Image: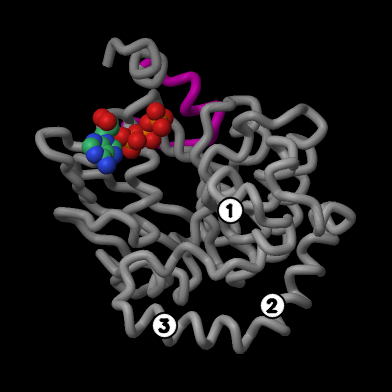
Amino acid sequence: MSAAFLEVEGLTKHYGGVAALDGCTLSLAKGEVTGLIGPNGAGKTTLLNALTGLAKPDAGRVTFDGADVTGLPAHRMAARGVVRSFQIVRELASLTVFETLLLAPPHQIGETLTGAMARRRRWWAQEHANAGKARTLLERIGLWRLADQPSARLSGGQKKLLEVARALLLEPKLILLDEPGAGVSPPLREEIIALVRELKGEGLSFGIVEHDMHLVGEICDHVHVLAEGRTLVSGTFAEATADPRVVDAYLGLA
Ligand code: ATP
């Protein structure tokens, strides 16, 4: 395995009496696609949120690219190159595909008002450059011909591609994708897999939360299986899925 890029050590996050993360320890390697899998309620989404500044961990440590980034707010994680995809289209149904892509990114959550306003001013000042980048990205994901259509009309798979494009607009080093295969038709699924592989070839790193095990098996170099807020098993997809502890966790026997 390549050198660790993102390291998570003993990460803990409680919601009331529930330990969504309970001393989670794992790492993501540079230039690889790492799957974060596990049964419902294992803590996968909470982990994505904690790694992108959308949930503040109660304990533990996160190191990215050699720096301690534990508990940094979302805009600072994004500035360091860690972004996650969002299911944004439903909320912004009236916007066109192009407008949806160009909207100021959601990583402003948690910023102070002054910080957010300054960022917004910078964002609009960059609008022209962003518009150029947005066109290139839409061409790349095959949606440029739909740029003026309402984004609500996109298919499930096209929305997923748009989510990846929105993350790419921030020029990240590590993209965390939340269920890129959910609600996606087979041809679009292949496009998403091809895009992730292509981006990996360009040096991008990925963490992917996914329930579709075929997709995980096809694109992940390495997987971590989470259960009850902790890493249960790490290894290749074949190793992890052959492990009896993983089978038990999915069957609710762990
Ligand atoms: P799924 O595969 O079903 O999406 P997951 O592995 O992503 O599950 P999380 O969504 O991270 O799991 O949830 C882990 C646990 O934390 C669950 O018991 C969930 O109910 C709880 N939880 C997560 N977020 C919150 C919240 N904001 N408030 C209260 N409980 C939460």
Does 37 appear above or below 74?
above
How far separated are the C-alphas under marks 1 and 3? 35 Å
How far separated are the C-alphas under marks 2 and 1? 27 Å
Task: Give the residue at mark 2.
Answer: 130
The outermost residue toward the right is 145
Does 226 appear above or below 93?
above
Nearer to us in this view, 190 or 86: 86
Does 73 appear above or below 17?
below
Give the residue type that dot 1 points to: Glu
Give whichever of discs 3 and 2 has the lower sequence position: 3
On screen, residue 245 versus residue 202, left or right, reads left
The residue carrying pointer 1 sits among few (fewer than 14), some (14 to 19) or many (20 or more) residues within 10 Å by Cα, namely many
How far separated are the C-alphas under marks 3 and 2? 18 Å
- Do labels 1 and 3 touch, CB within 8 Å? no
143 in magenta = no
Give the residue type that dot 2 points to: Asn
Residue 31 lies, in percent from the top left, at: 60, 59
Q: Which residues are magenta?
A: 230-244
- Do labels 2 and 1 touch, CB within 8 Å? no
Foreground label between 3 and 2: 3
Q: Secondary structure at mark 3?
A: helix
Give the residue type that dot 3 points to: Met
Q: Where in the image, quadrant-wise, is ligand 1 located?
A: top left
Task: Give the residue at mark 3.
Answer: 117
Residue at 37% over, 11% down: 251
Label drawn at residue 32: 1
Residue 13 lies, in percent from the top left, at: 20, 46
